[in-house]
Image: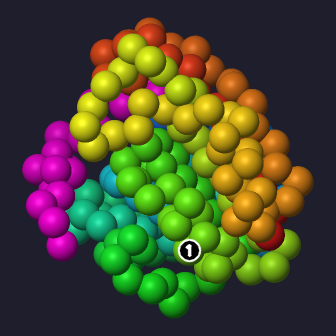
Amino acid sequence: MAYNVFEQLANRYDTKERIELAQVIVKEIRRELRNSESKSLLDYGSGTGLISLALWDVVDSVLLVDSSKQMLEVAQAKIDHKEIANAQVLHADFAQETPTCKADIILLSLVLLHISGTKSMLQTLFGILNRGGKLMIVDFDKNDAVYHPSVHNGFSQEELKKTLSEVGFTCIEIRTFHHGNRIFMNQDASLFVASGIK
């Protein structure tokens, strides 16, 4: 696997700013996940679990998947410390390997912007979902003020909707839910939540 910048960040990843932004996202996701008590949630690109470990009480089980072992070690320490019985971690990179797990809900929170082959990843995630399952994406709206050679500068909601539809998702909904100061590469930006059903 290629050098993973997140390996170096793991132990200092949970900054005040990231925790505050995670709380905004968690509030929005909880609203989307009402009536999901019997469902399994897979958090792809979970990092240290800032999002999904705040959702363990609204689903049946949580699987945190990340390509960074160090990030997952931090997440596992949180699981152990809080004694969260229905959460597990899995070290995997679905861009490099074929996943064998299944889930009712897949969450990607601020992950898609790091993935070069967006459509290919969405097809992989579509395959993991159980029939009737839901994909949820939280990411930044397209932002021309942002430039980074290895990160998307956000997403056009129309283009993402089209891609999700081409992959096979139905009942696609996308809306902006938060505007923040300097939250995306030090630029003001807005966050959207997108969802689609298999």
For the residue labelled by badge 1, is the local secondary structure a helix, a strand or a loop? helix
Q: In the drawing, does residue 186 fall left or right of residue 183?
A: left
Picture quadrant where residue 62 is located? bottom right
Mark 1, Cα crowd under 10 Å, few <14 / some 14-19 / many 20+, is some
Q: Which residue is mark 1?
A: 124
Residue at the (52%, 67%) spot, across then down: 120
> Is residue 145 part of the magenta span, yes or no?
no
In depth, the one of 82 and 60 nearer the eye is: 60
Residue 88 seen in this snapshot = yes
Residue at the (81%, 79%) spot, across then down: 131
Q: In the drawing, does residue 129 fall left or right of residue 62?
A: right
User: Eyeballing the image, is 7 above or below 13?
Assistant: below
Q: In the drawing, does residue 48 fall left or right of residue 46?
A: left
Quarter of the picture containing the C terminus is bottom right
**Mostly what secondary structure, the magenta segment?**
helix
Residue at the (48%, 21%) spot, across then down: 143
Q: Which residues are magenta?
A: 1-21
Query: Farthest bottom residue?
Result: 100
User: Eyeballing the image, is 90 above or below 12?
Assistant: below
Picture quadrant where residue 113 is located? top left
> Is residue 16 part of the magenta span, yes or no?
yes
Kind of residue sitting beneath label 1: Thr
Residue at the (58%, 41%) spot, across then down: 138
Residue 37 image point, x, y percent = 78, 65
